[in-house]
Amino acid sequence: MSPEDPEEPTLVIDCGGGGIKGTVLDEAGTMRAQPIRVPTPYPLSTDLFLATLAELAGRLPHAMRATVGMPGMIRHGVVVSTPHYVTVRGPRTRVDPALMAQWNGFDAREALREALGIPVLVLNDAEVHGAGVVAGKGLELVLTLGTGLGCALFDGGRMAPHLELSQAPVRWGLSYDTYIGEHERRRLGDSLWSRRVVRCIDGLRPMFLWDRLYIGGGNSRHITPSQVAKLGDDTIIVPNAAALVGGARAWQMQTD
């Protein structure tokens, strides 16, 4: 079978700032095993990253291909930049120049192919998340709320080139990552944080003019009902499980 065959079991690994979780999906997108989660180790060298994912894969059923979603700008499987993995102790800690040198330009797809022994697709984590929820009609934007902000854009069911919206300034010189990330949610509380989220979405609407907006990620469940009601009929809150279930579908949707 070819690596593009949708009937092949797919190992899916979602790499976040605080944790790395994985499972194996069958051809219908159904999990063959309960997801396994391990804390993201820091400082995270590229070698430790490969070893962590290989160890996780070894605890799951055999797969014929893999999809790995990770934070940052990923272009053709190569890491252009990643915000969390270049730090000494994780998100919002000091950047280590040696780690930055390791990660920038790291060919994650080829390195993981060698480490796992199967074809690998490496995408931004929001793109994998989006692959599990988009309908494939019109312009669809996916925003994921977690450690920071993830973003993926789909046009007619095809992935558009990734834009690292999370690093754009939004207010007071803060990036979206900082302004509506997990640190600010904890500092402000869900009510005030939810207002920030809705304000950001309102600001993005005239920029994208989407047909449908999907809001996912682990923190989407913390948006208060009163603020969800303000999002409009073109917006859907989706479960965080999509971060894994999109892994098989992503092989048919990616443009690389």
Image (spheres, rainbow, N blue to C red):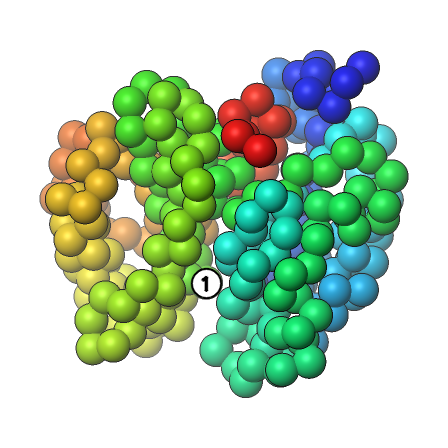
Q: Quadrant of residue 47?
A: bottom right
Secondary element at tag 1 = loop
- Point out the image quarter for the N terminus: top right
Query: Is residue 222 found left or right of 113 in the rendered image?
Result: left
Q: Residue at x 37, y 38 (%)?
A: 153
Q: Is residue 107 above or below residue 179?
A: above
- Mark 1 surroundings within 10 Å by alpha-carbon count, few (fewer than 14), some (14 through 19), many (20 or more): many
Q: Nearer the viewer, residue 23 or 8?
A: 8
**Amino acid on which disc 1 is placed:** Thr
Q: Is residue 203 above or below residue 82?
A: above
Give percent across and percent down for residue 204.
Answer: 20, 49
Q: Residue at x 74, y 61 (%)?
A: 49
Q: Quadrant of residue 85?
A: bottom right
Query: Is residue 128 found left or right of 102 in the rendered image?
Result: left
Give percent across and percent down for residue 176.
Answer: 31, 63
Give percent across and percent down for residue 245.
Answer: 57, 31
Q: Residue at x 57, y 22 (%)?
A: 252
Q: Which residue is mark 1?
A: 147
Q: Is residue 239 visible?
A: no
Q: Is residue 179 above or below residue 2?
A: below
- Point out the image quarter for the C terminus: top right
Q: Residue at x 36, y 21 (%)?
A: 156
